[in-house]
Image (cartoon, grey):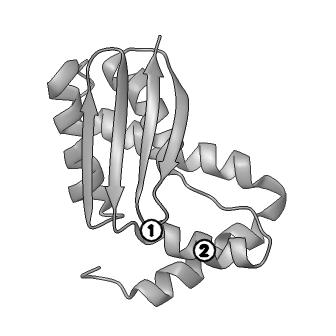
Amino acid sequence: MDDMDREFFKRYHRAVVKANANNVEKLKARIGSEWAEEFRRRSTGARLEGEEFNQALEDYLANELRFCDQVDVNGDGEEISIEVKGCHICHGNELLKAEGEPALCPIVPTGLFSISRVAGHRASLEEVRKNGVVGECEICYKLA
């Protein structure tokens, strides 16, 4: 994290989630919707398909949101996955989990809303695969 101390960010994330404990799911969806709308505006409202969509979303996540050290977006027309390494959000979620609080990952709905608004496809979350390393996951969506 170049511009912000990770310790501050994880504590800030924890505080925001705890302050909104009764509305975590709604907050997660609203953040995801806002970021997807920002991505849509950034792509000038054009529908992006296939690899063009994958590269544009990857660029937005990596260079605009900068929420992790590395992100790869892959898809084959039937599914899309977002592979994340070095996620800064996850460290705050670890604090929350240790306290028995719900975690909040706005990247999951950001991908879902982006697929709908920019690629023009209906999608559903298939699964989030975690390999046991804090900050690493693969978010998998199924296209309808």
68 lies left or right of 72:
right
Between residue 61 and residue 37, name the one nearer to us. 61
Q: What residue is rendered at 36% in x and 36% in y?
A: 81
Q: Earlier in the sequence, mark 1 or mark 2?
A: 2
User: x and y percent of residue 138 in the render?
Assistant: 41, 46
Q: Nearer the viewer, residue 129 or 60?
A: 129
Considering only vertical position in the picture, is 17 above or below 1? above
Residue 82: x and y, percent? 35, 42
Q: Is residue 90 left or right of residue 61?
A: right
Q: Which mark is residue 69?
A: none
Q: Compared to 31, does 97 lie above or below?
A: below
Residue 39's quadrant in the figure?
Answer: top left
Q: Residue furthest top?
A: 144
Which residue lies at the image location 64% right of the left edge and 76% below the top edge? 14
Of the numbered discs in the image, which one, if any, rests on residue 94? 2
**Residue at 48% across / 32% down in the picture?**
112
**Badge 1 is on which residue?**
133
In what element is the residue under mark 2?
helix
Label 1 neighbour load within 10 Å: few <14, some 14-19, many 20+: few
